[in-house]
Image (spheres, grey):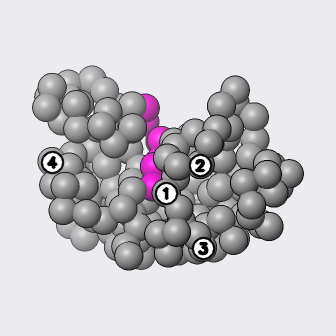
Amino acid sequence: MKVYAVIRLRGSVGVPGDVELTLSSLRLTRKNSCTIVEATPSIGGMLEKAAGYVTYGEINEAVLAGLLEKRGRTVGGRKLSSSYLEKLGFGSFKELASALLEGRIKLNEIKGLKPVFRLHPPSKGFKGSMRKMYGQGGELGYRGAAINELISRML
């Protein structure tokens, strides 16, 4: 099963109403926020509609484990800890990441875990334009496995 990491790169000024509704359905209400979604046809349509405001691609296990460890938050804003993982039945962040990628558990099924990760702007900045699609000299839209490098720079 494919799992996408979706990052909102552009702010909320001048966003059409239907695109803003799509972004809120993806739980991407702020710039530099990230969420993990399954690659279903309905999610694919939402990503196509919001492609001018987000970038997305297939996340790997190591980057997802790092994202959970460094940016995972529980309700109340506390960091996701290894003791909390043990209460959930996982021995490590890597084990939780593996379960998420294999589809054994969904992010929204984990009680008390916020489904959105707030990221820093990328170190050394963005490489392209925020108005062009990835592959055409920009940062937006589908980028495949290159999303892992971007997330690593945003942690």
Q: Residues within 10 Å of mark 4 (few under 14, many from 20)?
A: some
Q: Position of residue 89 (x, y in %)?
A: 74, 61
Instruction: Name the residue rendered at 38%, 76% in the picture.
Output: 1
Q: Residues within 10 Å of mark 1 (few under 14, many from 20)?
A: some
Question: Spatial distance from mark 3 to mark 1, Cα to Cα?
Answer: 11 Å
Residue 34 in magenta stretch? yes
Question: Spatial distance from mark 2 to mark 1, Cα to Cα?
Answer: 7 Å
Label 2 or label 3, whichever comes before in sequence order = 3
Label 3 or label 1, whichever comes before in sequence order = 3
- The answer to whether any part of residue 133 appears in the image is no
* Residue wearing tag 3: 98
Instruction: Name the residue rendered at 33%, 55% in the picture.
Output: 55
Mark 3 against mark 4, which lies toward the viewer? 3
Q: Amino acid at mark 2?
A: Ile
Q: Amino acid at mark 1?
A: Lys
Q: Position of residue 84 (x, y in %)?
A: 79, 48
Q: Amino acid at mark 3?
A: Ser
